[in-house]
Image (spheres, rainbow, N blue to C red):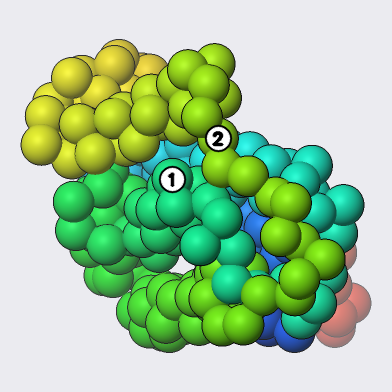
């Protein structure tokens, strides 16, 4: 598990920097997911009840936030036929509903209080601190990096001057277009205020896993101790030690010594 903790730190930092310098909306969101999976693996590597529960909750919370981001990136592409962030901008005037939902999705992905992502991130950080404090510090820095590349993308898409070739773009107006986003926002915000509904579901899967870990770890420790005792016993009963014992006749005892005995 220490190897997993190191790899999760690499995932958080590498995915975050690639997302920051990417210019394609899908690349930014995709590498954002790669970075966020590092938090999940950090919670799993700690093998703590709080961190494991937070990791499972974070997978669900991340699915809601990333689902919203991909859906809105797809809507922007459908209207502009472009995913190039520098060439876009000013779309909030044409898409007020999409831009507002995009802000909420970015806040959820960052883990701002008011979304279930915040609860999951806090559980991972608190549960992993005792075992991997350095990795937790890197994870906190990764949250700042997430804030940087998501708001950079949001500013590039929806704010600033708009190119007139995108003046034909329009907002999501139909119920079928708005309803999926509203459902994901409601779930993300609702589980922040009522987390026990999600926690009870997650706990039903985490409790058996923790029970298995608590049964396996003592047995493994006992086996290591038994193996260590056996090695010490073998070392004490080695031929060199046996030859040194007085009155003992061993195959390594010189012939002259055997005659004396």
Drawn side of residue 164 relative to residue 34, left or right:
right
Quarter of the image for the C terminus: give it.
bottom right
Residue 212, how many percent across, how many down? 40, 25
Residue beneath disc 2: 172
Quarter of the image for the N terminus: give it.
bottom right
Q: Residue at x 18, y 19 (%)?
A: 197
Q: Residue at x 53, y 51 (%)?
A: 95
Drawn side of residue 246 relative to residue 200, left or right:
right
Q: Residue at x 70, y 50 (%)?
A: 169
**SS for tag 1?**
helix
User: Would you place residue 101 above or below residue 139 in this image?
Assistant: above
Count of residue discs: 2
Question: What crowding class fits label 1: few (fewer than 14 Cα within 10 Å), some (14-19), or many (20 or more)?
Answer: some
Drawn side of residue 33 relative to residue 126, left or right:
right
**Cα distance in 3D space between marks 2 and 1:** 7 Å
Of the pair 42 and 201, the residue shown nearer to us: 201
Residue 69, how many percent across, how many down? 58, 48
Question: What crowding class fits label 2: few (fewer than 14 Cα within 10 Å), some (14-19), or many (20 or more)?
Answer: some
User: Would you place residue 147 above or below residue 28 in this image?
Assistant: below
Drawn side of residue 197 relative to residue 238, left or right:
left
The answer to whether the residue labelled 2 contacts the one labelled 1, judged by CB atoms less than 8 Å apart, is: yes
User: Would you place residue 110 above or below residue 63 in this image?
Assistant: below
Residue 145, how many percent across, how many down? 51, 82
In the rendered structure, which disc, 2 or 1, sits on the residue that comes first in sequence?
1
Residue 234, how many percent across, how many down? 63, 60
User: Dividing the picture into quarters, in which one does residue 245 lie?
Assistant: bottom right
**SS for tag 2?**
loop
Residue beneath disc 1: 97
């Amino acid at each position: 598990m220490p190897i997993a903790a190191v790899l999760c730190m690499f995932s958080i930092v590498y995915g975050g920097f690639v997302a920051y310098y990417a210019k394609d909306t899908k690349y930014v969101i995709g590498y954002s997911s790669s970075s966020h999976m590092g938090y999940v693996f950090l919670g799993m590597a700690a093998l703590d009840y709080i961190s494991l529960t937070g990791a499972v909750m974070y997978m669900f919370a991340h699915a809601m936030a990333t689902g919203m981001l991909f859906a809105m990136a797809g809507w922007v592409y459908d209207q502009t036929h472009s995913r190039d962030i520098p060439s876009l901008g000013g779309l909030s005037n044409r898409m007020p509903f999409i831009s507002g939902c995009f802000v909420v999705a970015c806040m959820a992905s960052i883990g701002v209080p008011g979304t279930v992502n915040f609860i999951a991130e806090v559980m991972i950080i608190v549960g992993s601190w005792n075992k991997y404090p350095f990795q937790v510090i890197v994870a906190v820095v990764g949250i700042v990096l997430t804030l940087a590349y998501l708001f950079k993308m949001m500013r590039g898409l929806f704010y600033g001057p708009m190119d007139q070739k995108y003046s034909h773009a329009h907002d999501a107006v139909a119920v079928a277009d708005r309803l999926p986003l509203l459902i994901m926002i409601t779930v993300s915000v609702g589980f922040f205020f009522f987390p026990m509904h999600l926690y009870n579901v997650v706990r039903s899967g985490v409790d058996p896993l923790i029970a298995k870990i608590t049964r396996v770890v003592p047995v493994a420790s006992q086996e290591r101790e038994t193996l260590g005792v056996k090695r010490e016993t073998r070392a004490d009963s080695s031929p060199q030690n046996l030859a040194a014992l007085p009155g003992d006749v061993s195959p390594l005892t010189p012939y002259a010594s055997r005659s004396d005995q």
